[in-house]
Image (cartoon, grey):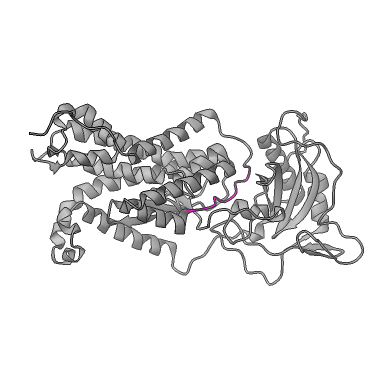
Amino acid sequence: MNSPAVLPCCYNRLQCSPSITPPTHFLRFVIRKKRSLVCRLSDNNKEDDSVQDDNNSHQDNDQPLENTSLENNDGPQLNEQTGVEQDGTNVQVASGSPLPGVKPQQLDESIRIPKETVEILRNQVFSFDTFFVTSQEPYEGGVLFKGNLRGQAAKTYEKVSKRMQEKLGDDYKLFLLINPEDDKPVAVVVPRMTLQPETTAVPEWFAAGAFGLVTVYTLLLRNVPALQSNLLSVFDNLDLLKDGLPGALITAFLLGVHEVSHRLVATEVGIKLGIPYFVPSWQIGCFGAITRILNVVPNREDLLKVAAAGPLAGFSVGFILLLSGFILPPSDGIGIIVDPSVFHESFLAGGIAKLLLGDVLQEGSPISVNPLVIWAWAGLVINAINSIPAGELDGGRIAFAMWGRKASARLSALSIGLLGISSLFNDVAFYWLVLIFFLQRGPIAPLSEELTDPQNKYIALGVVVLFLGLLVCLPYPFPFSNQPAL
């Protein structure tokens, strides 16, 4: 689960699923549970690119600039839409909580954005050639701008970011997002002081270490069937845990490959990840790791690269180990005796077993397999459940990066519903559903710029991850042999 985020990783923020809210608070829908939003603002260029009026589907007809929320006339006024009081000098807005998973500063007074700063943003930072502002309103600790996007979103974001840097320094952040009500672009500017790293009562390293120790125990326990029927007997047979060491090492290796791949790609694209929290499971040894994303992700393509890296690496190594297990004979000449029916639990494992074992695989006739098959299969399952397109799992982040916030939210709801049905028949699905609901259901925190689609080659990688996860999780429905067992 890359999440505080997902498993073997999904980078965490512990918020609930999005819900439709009034227009002025649409970012609440986009960003987090019951917290306030915050968005990142980058800086923009002074150079003017050619205006592409017919190039973008997000453009509207130009409208006169409406000062709906931040302009003040004589004396204090109350914005009827947002309920924000305005005076002659400053616009006072409620201090908002930052990105999901980030704890806001405890300020003695509401954050104020001076009227002069708002004027600079509207007239000097935003412009006709980038984002033509048609209306604005206070939102939480910042300002929400509605308007018409000019040209490509990525270039516009870069230019506006540079301009804001030149005019206002590093005091503010910008986000270029989609309004879920009308699917039109909006920009949100918030003070950086509203964004502070989250602090916890228990040091992160201590909590992560405790979870890691329990995970080591469950990995060992999962590979000693004699102890699984009576967990209390473990304390009287601690020496038996060493029998589970080979299987635990293989599964841990696949977990490590998954996590390291996330981190290598995250470093490459400039995304900071927190300490992974491995989630123990007595059914499969480990559910993966929850890892927080500590900074704002620049765009959907970068998120897709990081989210897909872990499952791709885990599936690749796991698939090689699974094939090796079917091909290589057991080191002790005996291996593990299993009933062929177990291979009906996975379309991928069942298909490979049928392909490589042929008529040896007959219903009702136990066979001996290399234990590497079972160990690799467990690693594939861990990767697969983290590839489910739900919440802040790797699969949820992949779906969001490929298809956007609205489509991924619907797919997430569908996936959680199907997982709920599966949980009636499978205890792994049940515990995974509980974990997603309480820790990983999202929504995903806003990116700096959410309008630009990833390149097709990265979308193809994302589709491959979701497809492989489906093959591992779906059952194999076909009989293994038409010949009756002897």
Vertical position of residue 80 compared to residue 467: above or below: below
Q: Which quadrant of the figure has residue 205?
A: bottom left
Q: Can residue 229 be seen in this view?
A: yes
Q: Position of residue 153 (x, y in %)?
A: 68, 36
| Quarter of the figure with the C terminus | top left
Q: Residue furthest right?
A: 74
Residue 56 screen position, x and y as percent: 71, 32
User: Residue 219 or 42: which is nearer the viewer?
Assistant: 219
- Give the answer, above or below, for where 81 lies relative to 379: below
User: Is residue 149 magenta-colored?
Assistant: no
Residue 268 seen:
no
Q: Residue at x 31, y 51 (%)?
A: 426
Please tell me which residue is depicted at 66% across the width and 69% down the height of the picture.
107
Looking at the image, which residue is at 54% across and 46% down?
409
Residue 10 x %, y %: 45, 49
Considering the whole magenta stretch, tell me its main secondary structure. loop
Count numbered badges in the picture.
0
Residue interval drawn in magenta: 441-449
Q: Position of residue 183 (x, y in %)?
A: 67, 42
Describe residue 39's horizontal placement relative to residue 69 as left or right.
Answer: left
Q: In which quarter of the image is residue 117?
A: bottom right
Q: Does the magenta stretch include residue 443?
A: yes
